[in-house]
Image (cartoon, rainbow, N blue to C red):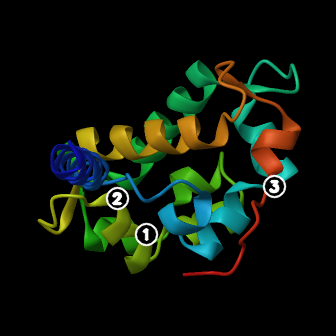
Amino acid sequence: MRSIIRPRAVQGLAALAALLLSSPFALADDMVSFATGGYARGLRTMPEMHKIDTDNDGTVSREEWMAYQNKVFDALDKNHEGKIDEKEFLAPSTEMASFATGGYARGLQTRAMMHKIDTDGDGTISKDEWIAYQTKLFDMMDKDKKGALGPSEFLARGTSSSPH
């Protein structure tokens, strides 16, 4: 019986490891591993939260978050092709400056962040990649899983705040 249990235990562990490693974000369980330190610092501020919280109720709902992120994507997609290349991503956006904080824009518009969002590595960020990244980010921040980020969740720095 002992010889049967060990192989099954090993198989179970191998299956669990395969499942965990199959997701591109499986190991990104906190902001630090998922985003650069500059992006996290620029995003997780009260001024940026107020920009996203359009109904001024003191929380950022999933709908407000996605509306804001769609607005950011559109501002970065300067040629309106539905994808953002490196030149567009890194270029200052006067349109984004009208609704985002400078710290957020500076933290976002880096090569390191582009590479984190460009999951297929083709040198562009598609709308699908952008939405997938922003959805994962919201879900990661929404610790209580209520579909809205209060100040404690929005501003949380986590246990590790060193830039990557």
* Amino acid type, residue under disc 2 in the picture: Ile
Q: Nearer the viewer, residue 92 or 60?
A: 60
Which of the 4 quarters of the picture holds residue 78?
A: bottom left
- At 53% from the left edge and 51% from the top edge, which residue is drawn? 95
Q: Do the residues labelled 2 and 1 touch (CB within 8 Å)?
A: yes
Alpha carbons under labels 3 and 2: distance apart: 21 Å
**Location of mark 3 (residue):** 45
Left/right placement of residue 97 relative to residue 1 reads right
Instruction: Please give the label number shown on residue 113.
Output: 1
- Residue occupying image coordinates x 11% and y 65%: 122
x and y, in percent, of residue 53 in the image? 75, 29
Residue at left offset 66%, top offset 34%: 142
Front residue of this view, candidates 34 and 65 = 34
Tell me the CA gap for discs 2 and 1.
Answer: 6 Å
Which image quadrant is residue 154 in? top right
Q: Residue at x 37, y 53 (%)?
A: 25
Disc 3 to disc 1, C-alpha distance: 18 Å
Q: Residues within 10 Å of mark 1 (few under 14, many from 20)?
A: some
Q: In this view, does 140 lie above or below 45?
A: above
What residue does disc 2 label? 117
In percent of width and height, residue 74 lies at 38, 42
Mark 3: which secondary structure? loop
